Amino acid sequence: MKRNKASSVLLIWGFPADLLLVFVGIAAVLIATLYPFNFSVPDNFSLGAIFERFDNTSFFNDQVNNILLFMPLGFGVASILIRKNVSPLIQVLAVIATGACLSFTVEFLQSFLPSRDPTPADIFNNTLGSFVGLLSLYILDTRQFRSTLDYIQNSRVSNSRAGIVGFLTGYIILAFFVGISWENNISLSQWNTNFPLVIGNERTGDRPWQGSVSQIAIADKAFSDSEIKKVFSNPNYLASTNDALLAKYKFDGKDNYRDITGKQPDLLWQGQVSNGSSSNQKGISVDSSRWLKTEKAVKLINQRISETSEFTIITTVASANVLQKGPARIISVSGDPMHRNFTIGQDNTNLSLRLRTPITGQNGSEINLSVPNVFSDTTPRRIIISYAKGKIQVNVDKPENVYLFNLLELYPNNLKVFAYAITFIPLGLYLTVLIIMVKRKAFNLILLISGAVLPSLIIESILIHASDKSFSLVNLMLGVFFTACTALVFKARTLILSN
């Protein structure tokens, strides 16, 4: 291992380190995104069919992983271009184009992999990762950092009071946009429209529940407290909510069960259907040998709820075994055990909920939502579950028995720290540039303190308004910490290079 004097690049086994990094980065991308390489050509192969598969959505964990995965590629490509004395603009364009082309190639190839789902958002995240790799090189490389510093200090914007005010205004506007973008974390817009409604199991038949269900109703809005009281007190109240009601199944007869609203497909028996499949006074009985599934996807339910990002589910269920776990699936709109829009399940005596959002993931399991002791016995339970603006409300048997969950308040700490890091570190970089532009040292401390606190206050206020969550000093300080530390670290490096 040695350094080439002409190019000042580290040589490994006689090859430039940045060139090796590019090859390793490409290999890592191909292995991470295409393994186990079990390619197959679909029977209905056509470009139209291939691009129809590009309708999947990306979740928070996926977004972070996709950015990190492409950073080495962007870092290596940028280093090679700098050695070749390519202009900065061409460097940026080349890195973006390289990341986008590799990402599109990978996503296209995933269309031929049964175990993979091509996702349009991944192309953007991968390309962003390449660009972040370039920025990382600019920050770490002393020559590039000094060149960027000189450019900022001598720019027309930094020597203009109006330019500095405009740059500060842009900083505040950026904080507002970041806060508004966080609202998407509690949206239901990423629901998959191709999932069926399944009662008593997963679509794949490997998550059975043993019990009975007597009614299911689904609406595309969150019922208010007064509406929930009316549902409990008046069995016929649902008939007056036709505009919001997407489905209502009453279980009588034995062959199939039609949606009373006429909007959804029939529920049909799956598994070992027998004469014993008929309903009784408790509703239909399901177990590991028989369960219900709609004959096709409940597209209207999925589409309408993804548009409103609200829903209410009303059902009456009775468990036949208080020790079921997994959770055992009672009611589910899902494709398989790892992909769902929502699921109501039983985990021992607890009612378990899974809901597909950007922060809970495509399996809805990143945040634990559990109502205790709902299934402590085999008594039928009247359950109403409503969702709006990140809040889940569960009423069991009567309006007074209410359980509330706020997704933003239940964000796991490891995900929260990472989410705040990738949100506020870029704001810290922006603040660093602003501090460098303001040459009067007397204002630097004021600008650092106010610039670190203000975005965190703005984003926390937006989230409180969006989801009615309570004010969190921890969240506020976490944002301040990442913004201030980033600004201080790069300001310190600026001072070192200036001396």
Image (cartoon, grey):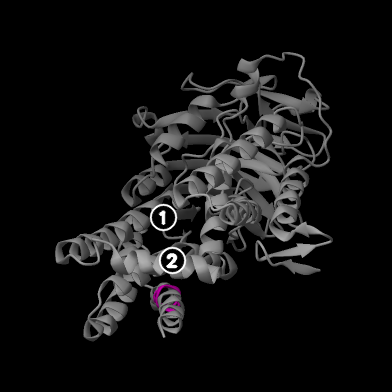
Residue that badge 1 annotates: 182
- Number of numbered discs visible in the structure rendering: 2
Q: Is residue 215 above or below residue 9?
A: above
Q: Give the position of the N terminus as an image quadrant.
A: bottom right
In the visual, does 444 lie left or right of 365? left
**Residue at point 84%, 61% (across, down):** 13
Quarter occupied by residue 371: bottom right
Q: Which x, y percent locates residue 393?
A: 45, 54
CA gap between label 2 and label 1 equals: 34 Å
**Residue at point 66%, 41% (across, down):** 339
Q: Which secondary structure, mark 1?
A: helix
**Residue at point 72%, 46% (across, down):** 26
Q: Which x, y percent locates residue 462?
A: 31, 60
Q: Is residue 483 magenta?
A: yes
**Residue at point 68%, 36% (across, down):** 106
Residue that badge 2 annotates: 147
Q: Which x, y percent locates residue 465?
A: 30, 59
Q: Is residue 10 above or below residue 68?
A: below
Q: Nearer the N terminus, badge 2 or badge 1?
A: 2
Give, as a single range, the part of the protein colored magenta.
Answer: 480-485
Q: Main secondary structure of the magenta part?
A: helix
Q: Is residue 43 magenta?
A: no
Say what amino acid the circle numbered 1 marks: Trp
Residue 194: numbered disc: none
Q: Which secondary structure, mark 2?
A: helix
